[in-house]
Amino acid sequence: MYDAQNYLNKIKRLILILPMLLPIFAHSQAVIKGDMVSIRETTIPSACWPGQIRKSSADSKLKSCLPAGTFDEFTLNTATQTLTGKTLTSPTINTPTSDVVNFDDQASTPSNPSANFYKLYFKSDGNLYKLNSSGTETQIDVAAATTPDQSYEISNCSIATSVSGNALTIALKDKSGSDPSGSSICKIGFRSSTAGTGTYVQRSVSAATSVVVSSGSTLGHASARTSYTYVYALDNAGTVELAVSSRYFRPNDRCTSTAEGGAGAADSGTTLYSTTARTSVGCRVLAMLTDSQTTAGTWASNVSQIDLTPFEPIRPRVRYTSDAGNVMTRNSWTTLSWEDLDTDPYNAYSGGTFTAPWDGNYSFATGAEVGGLTGNSITVIRAARGGTVFQHGPECRGGGDPYSATSALCNMSGTVYLSAGDTLAFAFWFDDSTANRNLTTTTGANNTVITWTGF
């Protein structure tokens, strides 16, 4: 009974597939063995009848004839299938929103794709990358799409310095001290290079970036004196470049730089130096360097301290004194020139003239004492900016000095705005009718103090 029922079931299945097999039988490509049908491999013709099935001798795949009269690969079922060892050539992939694409980590950059194609992959660092046919690998910053940037942002950036051949190299690094890369990008926000535009841009650095202060370039520093250098990033139309100066610019300014030149001639304390000169570009201060060289411009030793932004810059402040008996010419203005240094971190005072290292407001106070005067002698101090007198102090008379009956101690103070490079000087006048007089040696009587108070 069981055998009869079994054969009956086989006959029923055969009846169901006969309509599909008849075209095959017509061309003698199929052989029936029991309840199985064996299909011989054959060359696939260019035309066919719908419903016809053949097995290709070229690739051993089943082909079915489409309604259009051409063969296509036969799909055995519509269930989910795993493709192993398959190559998809120019596929169109429609991915439902509920699907997930899984990627294996790549230990290293894979081979380049064909021309006009990209490869998309994750590496073992967990970041997503794309690779073009030229071999350029770029990290895809997924976080940037969801994390807003900031105009003041400076992230994953640090500074490293080194000396070689008496030249100083300043390099931009990531937070770990390595060169920025596609997998470790340094980001810097810049204001617009247009003065009247209030927008900002954020630039990314993914390669080694540096600037060199050549041997012989002093940056305005003095020998054997602690000096300060500021490192800046410039936005050159999207490419970040480094610049250096002893001058402190506003934290997010528009700057113009001069080419360092590479020949040891970058000697100004108020000039911004970069590898290539740039004009009115966005700039950000990145760091302050502290160093002291035995001979200014001979970068024999590395910097002693690096302070990353935000930091408190060392403000310009000079104080010089003199007790050497300098001669004041009677009935004439004599420049007060002090030779004894108290403090001058930017080497800004020389020969009686102060040269402003930064833009800003400066307070000043100066005093001088002349001895050997008669009671009728008048003395006064004046201040000049860029050679133009802008303030006189009060008149002082001989004999009015609390330290001496024949001396005159005059003082004056005030404030003045100076642009970087402007000069400030003081002169002394007295009308004694007998002879020139010397400054006294009274401690603290003869001095000048000038202090930067802000932008």
Image (cartoon, rainbow, N blue to C red):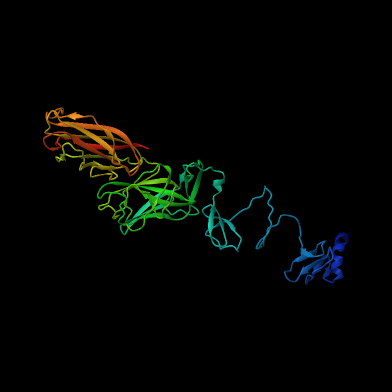
Total numbered circles: 0
Position of the N terminus, as image quadrant, is bottom right
Q: Is residue 390 above or below residue 300?
A: above
Q: Nearer the viewer, residue 310 or 413?
A: 413
Please say whether residue 130 is visible from this viewpoint. yes
Q: Is residue 355 above or below residue 259?
A: above
Q: Is residue 64 above or below residue 400?
A: below
Position of the C terminus, as image quadrant, is top left
- Residue beneath the point at 83% across and 70% down: 31
Q: Is residue 203 left or right of residue 272?
A: right
Asked where in the image residue 432 lies, by quadrant, the reply is top left
State the image coordinates of residue 222 (x, y, percent, origin top left): 26, 49
Q: Nearer the viewer, residue 104 or 275?
A: 275
- Residue beneath the point at 46% across and 55% down: 207
Asked where in the image residue 154 lies, by quadrant, the reply is top left
- Residue beneath the point at 28% across and 38% down: 384
Asked where in the image residue 450 lies, by quadrant, the reply is top left
Q: Is residue 109 left or right of residue 359?
A: right
State the image coordinates of residue 360 (x, y, percent, origin top left): 35, 38
Q: Is residue 345 left or right of residue 332?
A: right
Q: Nearer the viewer, residue 340 or 12?
A: 340
Q: Is residue 420 above or below residue 2?
A: above
- Residue beneath the point at 40% across and 43% down: 309
State the image coordinates of residue 70 (x, y, percent, origin top left): 80, 65
Please say whether residue 444 is visible from this viewpoint. no
State the image coordinates of residue 248 (x, y, percent, origin top left): 36, 44
